[in-house]
């Protein structure tokens, strides 16, 4: 019996499967497409061989078949060698090459034996057979190692791919971020422009609010100037009369009454003082009006808040009186005589006071309309006090309608107004709040009860230097914090 | 003739006293002054039948001149009468509405500021002559 080197199936069939595995294992389709193509059609090469076997009538176990088979194995091993050398850059391919080498040597060495018909039964005593076993084991072991290496390689490749994909994704993201950043920068620019426009508009509004309140004042101012001017003309007139009388008296010579003369002189002197006084009074009103309309210089000067409060109370009252002639209110002034001068921007604080007074008169007027009759006396009171902490308090209280719960949160918001359209800009209290808090580091709060009245309380530090530091980064539009208590 | 002048401006006193110095010295006119409607009413209560004429500003803090006029008309409406004083209104706001209201309330005259003292003097002296004349 001949040595069975291969199982009794043609090596050609084995090789077909081996090469199929090899093609996939080494990914020949990508790495060597032409070689892959060649190996794919290897069976075509097997056909004539099988045909020869058929024609010669050889059986599987005949000598011819063995000879052909041996040659074929050598060819296949050589082909595998070529493929592996071709792919030597790949580590698993090199490993396979090393694994294949002993078997290749054996296959080559066996060819002459086959042709000499020198076949022998497999025996452990035969060194060639031991070598065959060794070469097969070597091949299998090498294949396993190569398989492991290939797995590792694939894993690495996958990682690389993943990394590459992450990198690509990162690039994509970076680009996206860049685009977003660019659009944000553009938007920020647009917003800045809009903000600038808003600022300009706000300044215009502030100016028109000033002008609007000046309009409200005009009638009051006219009345307030008319009164002192009347006194000036009247006292001047009467002084002329007195002088005439004095001259008459002097011309009487001996009969002159020195007592009368003295009295006339005293009166004249008194009149001149009064003329000066009322002239100053008119001038101060005009000055106040000019200061009110002029853009504020923002300069803080020692200011007599008592005088300011008194002046603007009268202006506001007469302003309203001029519009509504049947309106009347009791003005109650409680001004601390020892009030020190306060470093303040006079026209600005004046504007705040004017606004508070106008609101107070509006509130009592509203209540008067709801409650005609003698048991309601519209009263607006202004009171100044020096607080122990070194600040000055001005309180403006009315016994008007009070502020309804629902709108208390909003009264310091710009453009909020409860007055009918056209009667209020809604900027008065908002500007007042800014002037007191931002402009003077003071506070503006209020106490109100519906149907009973409202009291606005301004507190100003005596000087800018010892004032509490303003809150850093305060919002541009006032947040309108406020204290709310109910007054008894 | 006793005249009560009601005005919140304090210097009105000095002005009237000088403008009518001759008449005051001559005893034809006697002036009293009140600085508010309330003060005027108090004065009237104390000097019930003496005051013949009231010259009142309209526009005053607290009780306005028109309110004062209303009070006076109310108080003197019930008999037995001391003859009610005449009330002349003096105001810086010479609008028709105020004039109509004042006249409706029984004001005997309505004068606008600035006061024409020559005309006022004439009116007062005329009234004084009437007043001092013996009753028929």
Image: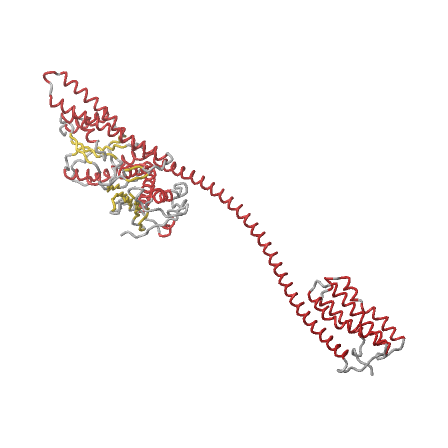
Q: Quadrant of residue A159?
A: bottom right
- Judge whether A452 appears above or below A103 on screen: above
The location of residue B98, given as percent across then percent down, is: 30, 35
Q: How many marks can you see?
A: 0
In this view of the protein, which residue sits in the foreground, A345 or A55? A55
Q: Residue furthest left?
A: A254
Q: Quadrant of residue B42?
A: top left
Relative to residue A155, is residue B93 drawn left or right?
left
In this view of the protein, which residue sits in the foreground, A341 or B24? A341
Q: Residue furthest right?
A: A56
The location of residue A289, given as percent across then percent down, is: 33, 33
Relative to residue B94, is residue A57 drawn left or right?
right
In this view of the protein, which residue sits in the foreground, A132 or A55? A132
Q: Quadrant of residue B112?
A: top left
Question: Coloring scheme of the render?
Answer: secondary structure
The location of residue A444, given as percent across then percent down, is: 33, 46
Q: Residue furthest bottom?
A: A1
- Judge whether A270 appears above or below A12 on screen: above
Instruction: Pick the quarter of the image with the N terminus of chain A.
Output: bottom right
The location of residue A217, given as percent across then percent down, is: 34, 36
In this view of the protein, which residue sits in the foreground, A399 or A98? A98
């Amino acid at each position: 019996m001949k040595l069975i080197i291969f199982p009794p199936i043609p090596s050609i069939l084995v090789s077909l499967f081996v090469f199929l595995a090899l093609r996939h294992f080494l990914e020949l389709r990508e790495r060597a497409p032409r070689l892959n193509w060649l190996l794919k059609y290897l069976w075509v090469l097997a056909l004539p061989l099988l045909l020869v076997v058929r024609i010669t009538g050889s059986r599987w176990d005949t000598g011819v078949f063995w000879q052909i088979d041996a040659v074929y194995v050598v060819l296949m091993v050589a082909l595998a060698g070529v493929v592996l050398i071709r792919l030597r850059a790949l580590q698993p391919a090199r490993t396979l090459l090393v694994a294949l080498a002993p078997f290749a040597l054996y296959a080559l060495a066996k060819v002459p034996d086959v042709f000499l018909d020198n076949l022998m039964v497999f025996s452990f005593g035969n060194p060639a057979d031991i070598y065959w076993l060794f070469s097969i084991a070597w091949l299998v072991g090498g294949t396993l190692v190569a398989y492991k290496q290939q797995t590792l390689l694939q894993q690495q490749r996958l990682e690389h791919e993943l990394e590459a994909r992450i990198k690509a994704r990162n690039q994509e993201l970076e680009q996206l971020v860049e685009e977003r950043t660019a659009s944000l920068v553009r938007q920020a620019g647009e917003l800045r422009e809009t903000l600038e426009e808003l600022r300009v508009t706000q300044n215009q509004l502030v100016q028109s609010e000033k002008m609007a309140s000046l309009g409200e004042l005009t009638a009051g101012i006219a009345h307030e100037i008319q009164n002192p001017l009347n006194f000036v003309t009247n006292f001047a007139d009467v002084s002329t009369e007195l002088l005439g009388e004095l001259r008459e008296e002097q011309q009487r010579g001996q009969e002159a009454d020195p007592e009368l003369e003295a009295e006339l002189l005293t009166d004249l002197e008194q009149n001149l003082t009064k003329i000066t006084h009322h002239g100053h009074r008119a001038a101060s009103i005009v000055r106040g009006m000019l200061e009110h309309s002029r853009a504020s210089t923002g300069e803080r000067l020692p200011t007599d808040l008592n005088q300011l409060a008194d002046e603007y109370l009268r202006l506001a009252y007469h302003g309203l009186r001029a519009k509504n002639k049947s309106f009347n209110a009791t003005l109650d002034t409680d001004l601390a005589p020892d009030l020190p001068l306060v470093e303040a921007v006079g026209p600005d604080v004046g504007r705040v006071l004017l606004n508070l007074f106008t609101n107070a008169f509006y509130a009592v007027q509203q209540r008067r309309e709801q409650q005609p009759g003698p048991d309601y006396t519209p009263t607006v009171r202004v009171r100044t006090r020096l607080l122990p902490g070194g600040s000055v308090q001005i309180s403006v209280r009315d016994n008007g309608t009070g502020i309804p719960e629902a709108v208390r949160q909003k009264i310091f918001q710009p453009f909020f107004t409860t007055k009918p359209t056209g009667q209020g800009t809604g900027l008065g209290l908002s500007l007042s709040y800014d002037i007191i808090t931002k402009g003077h580091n003071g506070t503006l709060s209020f106490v109100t009860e519906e149907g009973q009245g409202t009291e606005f309380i301004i507190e100003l530090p005596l000087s800018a230097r010892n004032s509490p530091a303003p809150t850093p980064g305060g919002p541009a539009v006032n947040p309108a914090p406020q204290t709310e208590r109910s007054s008894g | 003739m006793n005249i009560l002048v009601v005005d919140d401006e304090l210097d009105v006193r000095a002005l009237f006293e000088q403008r009518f110095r001759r008449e005051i010295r001559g005893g034809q006119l006697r002036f009293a002054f009140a600085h508010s409607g309330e003060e005027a009413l108090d004065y009237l209560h104390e000097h019930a039948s003496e005051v013949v004429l009231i010259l009142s500003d309209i526009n005053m803090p607290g009780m306005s001149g028109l309110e004062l006029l209303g009070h006076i008309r109310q108080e003197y409406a019930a008999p037995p009468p001391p003859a009610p004083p005449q009330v002349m209104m003096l105001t810086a706001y010479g609008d028709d509405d105020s004039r109509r209201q004042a006249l409706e309330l029984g004001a005997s005259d309505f004068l606008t500021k600035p006061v024409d003292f020559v005309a006022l003097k004439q009116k007062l002296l005329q009234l004084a002559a009437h007043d001092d004349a013996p009753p028929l």
